[in-house]
Image (tube, helix red, strand yellow):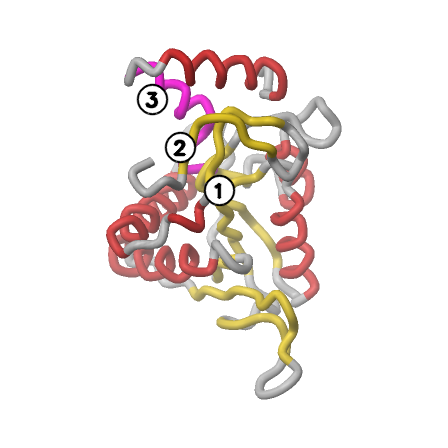
Amino acid sequence: MVCGALKFGRFTLKSGRTSPYFFNAGLLSSGPILAILSEAYAGTIVAAQQSSDSNISPLPSFDVLFGPAYKAIPFAASTALTLHTAHSISVGFAYNRKEAKDHGEGGSIVGVPLKGQKVVILDDVMTAGTAVREAIELVRKEGGEVVGVVQCLDREEVGKDGVSSTTREVEKLIGAGRVKAILRMRDLIEWLAREGRTTEVEAMREYREKYGLKD
């Protein structure tokens, strides 16, 4: 909120829904904020790999962090660095160009080649999940295997079928329990309630009642 990445009000999402909040990860763009964010991504990954909770599927070991263009590119680079410096975990990172390069090395992938690699995709936020599905398809096309997705924020909304969440729909593509998140909508509601922001809390709860998961 300090940098304006998280706002409350009335916003029309790509899905067409009118939301009481909006998250723009493109504004997470300073050194201190990227340091905190990469620590959060790395910590979420490590915790998911080491979880002993029988109800939570662990995140498998992997070789490459993939940051879909454009917002997630710095997230993948800084998180790969933090995994190395803070957790002694060595992984590569890669990202895609929006348009394939037809000269020089060519192709649409920059960074570690994905063929034969286990890949974790970093995402900012999923609403309909269109972008992350495209990223999964791209990784597979390059010969990689997507073993996980880590979001910054899980909106915890029902997906296209109006029953299960977008997260669960994506997990049908990569495996149950393999989509993780740093924060969830319920965490935002909790924080707003602690801050005494009753107007925002009411709007968030109404939205969740309409579009949120009921489990």
Q: Is residue 58 magenta?
A: no
Q: Amino acid at mark 3?
A: Trp
Would you name the residue on which mark 1 appears?
A: 151
Q: Earlier in the sequence, mark 3 or mark 1?
A: 1
The answer to whether residue 18 is above or below residue 129 is: above
Q: Nearer the viewer, residue 207 or 139?
A: 207
Q: Position of residue 24 (x, y in %)?
A: 46, 43
Which label lies toward us, 3 or 2?
A: 3
Q: Which mark is residue 33?
A: none
Q: Which mark is residue 52?
A: 2
Q: Position of residue 17 (x, y in %)?
A: 64, 28
Q: Nearer the viewer, residue 67 or 60?
A: 67
**Residue at point 48%, 55% (across, down):** 71
Q: Which mark is residue 191?
A: 3
Asked which secondary structure carries label 3, the reply is helix
Asked which secondary structure carries label 1, the reply is strand
Label 2: few (<14), some (14–19) or many (≥20) C-alpha neighbours in 10 Å? few
**Residue at point 52%, 64% (across, down):** 95
Q: Overall secondary structure of the magenta stretch?
A: helix
Label 3: few (<14), some (14–19) or many (≥20) C-alpha neighbours in 10 Å? few
The answer to whether residue 45 is above or below residue 21 is: below
Find the magenta span and give its range: 181-194
**Residue at point 32%, 52% (across, down):** 34
Q: Earlier in the sequence, mark 3 or mark 2?
A: 2
Q: Earlier in the sequence, mark 2 or mark 1?
A: 2
| 3D distance between C-alphas at marks 2 and 1 | 21 Å
Q: Amino acid at mark 2?
A: Ser
The answer to whether residue 123 is above or below residue 209 is: below
| 3D distance between C-alphas at marks 3 and 1 | 19 Å
